[in-house]
Amino acid sequence: MSGTAGLREECGVSHEGGSSRSLLLQSRAFDIFPGSMFRGFQQNRDSMLSLDIRDGSDDFRASPYENLTRFQHRVIPPSPPPTPPKNILPSTILITGGTGFLGKLVIEALFRRQSEFPFDRIVLLARGKRGQDPQARFRNTVATSPCFSNLSPSWMDQVQIVEGDVTKDKCGMRPELYREICRDVTHIIHCAASIKFDNPIKDAMKSNIGGTVNVCLLADKCRRLERLLMTSTAYVTPHTRDPIGEELAPLPLPVDKLKQIIKEGKISESEILKLTGHENTYTLTKCMAEHYIDEWSKTLPITIVRPSIISASRKFPFPGWIDSPAAFAGLVIGLSSGMLKVLDGSRSVKLDVVPVDDVAAEIINQTFLTGHEPSRIAYAVSTLTNALDIDETGITIMTYFNQTASKPAPKIMFCKHKSFEHRFLDICYHQLPLMAGKFYYSTKRNEAMKYKIGKLSGLISAVNRAFPYFCHNTFDFRPQKDLYDGEAFDTQAYVVTVCKGVQQHILNQRRAPVVSAKKKGGKATKGAPGDEADCGTFREGD
């Protein structure tokens, strides 16, 4: 029996109706990730409380990106801004990662814009969790989210929950469901990913590369497919002082060869990161996944959307909605406590933070407004024009959470990367006070406060592991089309919106001090009672 035929028989892969290219790439997928890896893989996600960073991060290791011996790979050609097709027929949309922060907003936006982009149903691929099957999990923990509160009560009637796992063969679906999906689906939006920075590289490959390959294999079987939308990250290109365009980020080796080196464990994880110029396994595996997507783009209509640091909503479903304490929200929580005083970063850096509803809108626009245009890469970023000045942003956050608005906000101390100064100040201002607090509440037998201090200590530690890369490096992303297209974007007013959202939906505090955003050259001032309306209506936290 030939190798290909044997692989087909072993994996239960049928060649009926499939192209030789589909079979070849299917074989490649199983070569990259053996069956045991697909069968045995189940992401381990700990339950997180309000002071957690939901997805951990690793200590960043700097490496000179400019000196890489670049492997020149085919670049997905840029294309003009999307234009809507003249006739839009009802669609069937498959979504992965719909239970996550971004995925929920994509679902909400699809229903809010259903008159603009009609669809028959949304098929949500999901896994069971904590003893609940996918249907019960969706009803009990996803559909009850405040982000869906403005939708019609009957919106769930158009959502079909399908049990599956993108890291497994045929995305973990039963054969009859897989055939149904291949027959009906017109659009696929792939949001599922492992975004933990400190995942072991082989685990990150299974989620971010294996999941991508399996979704592409599924898309290749969908007879009515109009567009496959893949979410990536703007940070697939390691830091460089040069402008970063909408093109494939180079790797120092062909992606298959790099995969093989990782698979065989010939060099350590730290050496792989140094070789590629990446700071963590998340951005590296997303970069590698884009190279595999590039190969599929020769036969499939694929769009890659690259968001930067995603945070609370700006407008929809209401300003300030957020349910993830990760990333920028973790920084806000640390500063809100008054305990995060020292950052491994530079005052001059600008953070590219983008509202989650703007990312969801771009995903939907790129999914439906591209018609039969070729494959493309599109940024969903704020750009340097609307990036957050980190020093000013820190003052705005601490002023907002300050109990007395007239009291000056404390200054953040910025330190050089991995310097002795940072380690010393971290011990003095973070570790020792938190250890003392934990000991004090232990003697008082106050387990609730002891637990909260422990969570806060973990969050501050995680922020100072995750943020140095972003707090020391400004990224100059250059999208073909500005996400805001000339629309005024008040960055510090948005920071206040994020603060209100974190306070309401993550910290679950009902009342918030009203503080105007600090303007350059001005002072923060207490707002009038009516100013609460500027940031929308807030709902009960989850």
Image (spheres, grey):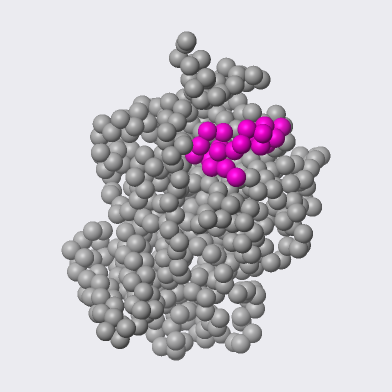
Residue 117 located within the stretch drawn in magenta: no
Q: Residue at x 25, y 61 (%)?
A: 416
Q: In the shown orientation, is residue 494 left or right of residue 275?
A: right
> Toward which corner of the image does residue 320 lie, by quadrant?
bottom right
Q: Residue at x 34, y 45 (%)?
A: 200
Most foreground residue, 138 or 317: 138
- Magenta region: 163-183
Res 408 visible: yes
Residue 64 percent location from the top left of the image: 29, 43
User: Vertical placement of 135 versus 38: above or below?
Assistant: below
Q: Residue at x 80, y 40 (%)?
A: 89
Most foreground residue, 430 or 308: 430
Q: In the shown orientation, is residue 101 left or right of residue 336?
A: right
Residue 75 percent location from the top left of the image: 50, 31
> Toward which corner of the image does residue 532 lie, by quadrant?
bottom right
Please identify the dominant SS of the magenta region. Answer: helix
Residue 212 percent location from the top left of the image: 51, 37
Q: Residue at x 43, y 83 (%)?
A: 402
> Toward which corner of the image does residue 336 lie, by quadrant?
bottom left
User: Vertical placement of 434 versus 303: above or below?
Assistant: below
User: Vertical placement of 16 versus 494: above or below?
Assistant: above
